[in-house]
Image: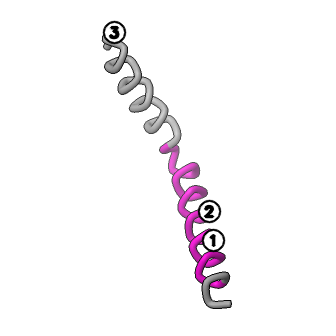
Amino acid sequence: MLRKRAWAGLMVIGAALVIVGVARGETVVVLQKAIRICLECIGIG
């Protein structure tokens, strides 16, 4: 029972952090960094 509560608590905290990140507009920053990394891997960036 304790594992289920801990798992549920972590899921709630994780969801809250995702919502805060989206509200702050960090999705654009993450996408830009992902694009840069991908372009560097294939040798274009």
Disc 1 marks which residue? 12
Element marked by disc 3: loop
| Residue 13 within the segment the image draws in magenta | yes
Q: Quadrant of residue 44?
A: top left
Contact between marks 1 and 2 (CB within 8 A): the answer is yes
Contact between marks 3 and 2 (CB within 8 A): the answer is no
Which numbered disc, 3 or 2, marks the residue that appears first in the sequence? Answer: 2
Q: Quadrant of the N terminus?
A: bottom right
Asked if residue 28 lies left or right of residue 19, the reply is left
Crowdedness near tag 2: few (<14), some (14–19) or many (≥20) residues, C-alpha within 10 Å: few
Question: In the rendered structure, which segment of residues is drawn in magenta?
Answer: 5-26
Going by the numbered disc 1, the residue's amino acid type is Val
Alpha carbon distance from label 3 to label 2: 35 Å
Crowdedness near tag 1: few (<14), some (14–19) or many (≥20) residues, C-alpha within 10 Å: few
Q: Quadrant of residue 20?
A: bottom right
Label placed on residue 25: none
Going by the numbered disc 3, the residue's amino acid type is Ile
Q: Residue at x 31, y 11 (%)?
A: 43
Q: How is the image coloured?
A: one colour
Which numbered disc, 1 or 3, marks the residue that appears first in the sequence? Answer: 1
Q: Quadrant of residue 12?
A: bottom right
Going by the numbered disc 2, the residue's amino acid type is Ala
